[in-house]
Amino acid sequence: MNSRIGRKSQSSLLILVFLVSIFVVAFFYFLFTSSTLQVKGVKGMKLSKISNYLDILKGYSRHALLLSSHVATKKVALSGGEINEVGIPRNWICNEDVSPDVEDVRFFLSEETLKYLNMYLEKSRIEDLPEQDIQNYTCVDYDVDGVLNGENDEKFNVGSYGSKIRVKLENDIVSSDNNVYEEITENRFWFVYRKFKEWTPEGARILNNSVTDCLQHVCDCPPMSPDGICEPCENTCRKFQNCIEGAIENTLAELKFDDPYVTCDANLIGCYYDSGLCDECNTCQKEEAEELCAKELSFQSNMNTEPLNILYLQGDEICGSMEAIFTCRDYKYLLSVEGERNLVFSVRATIEVEQYTCS
Amino acid sequence: MKGQTKEMIEILILVIGVSVLLVISYSFLIRMPSTGSLLLEMHRYDSMTNTVKNFFYIRIPILNKTYAQMLGDMVVNDAEDLVDYGYGNINVTEIIYEYFDPYYGEDWHFRVFNEKKYDFGYKIPSNVRIRTFLMKFPLPSYEGGVMRIEFKNW
């Protein structure tokens, strides 16, 4: 009787143990799978977070490129298609057409854009992002294929290269190239450049002929003081100056944009005369462009200041010289820059001619 | 009698064991929702960063300008709401509201810190959990200037 009770209790115990075992196995299985799912979920979130951070930094770089391009076009246009330390626009006319080619302007525009872009990157530390590192760009390049045919009149593309981003979140590190490409719209830098470029050969011819014609007025002017070199004509030779101002007006009239949003003016900034040989009262100033993205791009001045290729006439007794700045303002769009937001493009013209002795 | 006592003790041990397991399971299950809400919180935060990120990427049709560009132009020109682009004034404040409202309704606040503060969005409540995202935006400048922004969602 006792052994039968013992067997019965043993079998019920076994069933109980069996049920408990199933419960325990099921419990640990549930525990394991749910923790794996959590780990996967957290990992996924972390990856999405890092990817978001990379996108944010790339977005920052892209926006910085856009603003840098606006600032650079503003600055380069003001300097006549280059960047110089003198602070006056580049010569496009030095008795003859010396206007910069598209490639020259592309070089200066790219270097200037790069300078501003890297300034923005240096301030890019974002508080809410984990450990981050952005290397400076080494190269900016403009797509200029459509400049001369007018395709880039209102929009153009710019790319920046050579930067890398690294983001660290806990033990995960993600690196990526930070090359960005942006379309710049509502900026008529290349339009104004193209119009100036088309005008320069004829502008140089008109200005040269007109100033040569004006030289006869120097004969009516009082002689210069003994030590007077490059006598300014404002006070001593008003006739000559008036004639040159007329010549500038004629040259300006040839600068046609056929666009209601662009206005142009010209200012005489130098008018000189001299007896004898011209004494380099005016010089021709332009920066030499280098190869784009060929070196670590830090701007080094390579200014080329040279005497003009003087136009010799029948003698060498009288010298007349002038320089003027032609400026065009585009009112169609306003740039994303600090201060005055219109695009202002200025170029310099210098003419120096010699003529035979007055009769 | 001896056998019955033994069996009772064994059943008691089993019941205690199962109870312990149930308590553990219960506490585990209690913890589960907090992990879930953490993930949800992370997701919400990610969606905030995404919204701010798109300030750099999305160009407004017709105007063809990004939100970041228009905001920067407004701040640098010390304008209240309107920015001139040569062809008329654009109401940047209105554009910012139109951008955030569909995502967050009235549960957002966007602040720009420069020389002066610009506030957009709605009153920040005091009794709810508030998520904050801080960032910098490049500002039109000749020195590579930036403005700080703070975006809050609740």
Image (cartoon, grey):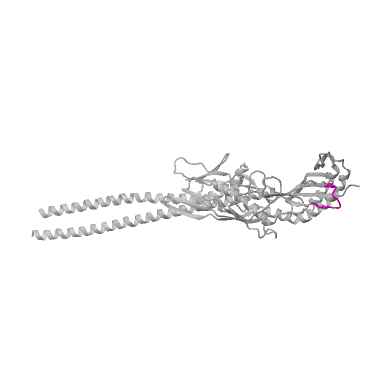
> Which residue is the extreme one toward the left?
A1
- Residue B146, percent from left and from top: 56, 44
User: Where does the magenta region start and end?
Assistant: A310-319
- Magenta part, dominant SS: loop
Is A312 one of the magenta-colored residues? yes
Instruction: Return the residue nearer the eye: A157 or A277.
Output: A277
- Residue drawn at the location 17% of the way across and 53% of the way down: B10
Residue at far right of view: A359
Q: Is residue A275 above or below residue A140?
A: above
Among the 4 quarters of the image, the one containing residue A224: top right
Provide residue A233's location: percent of width, then percent of height. 82, 42
* Residue at left offset 34%, top offset 57%: A33
Q: Position of residue A75 (x, y in %)?
A: 66, 48
The answer to which of A186 and B33 lies nearer the viewer is A186
Q: Compare residues A130 and A200 and report the one nearer the observer.
A: A200
Residue A327 in sight here: no
Measured as percent of width and height from the top left, residue B141 is found at 61, 45
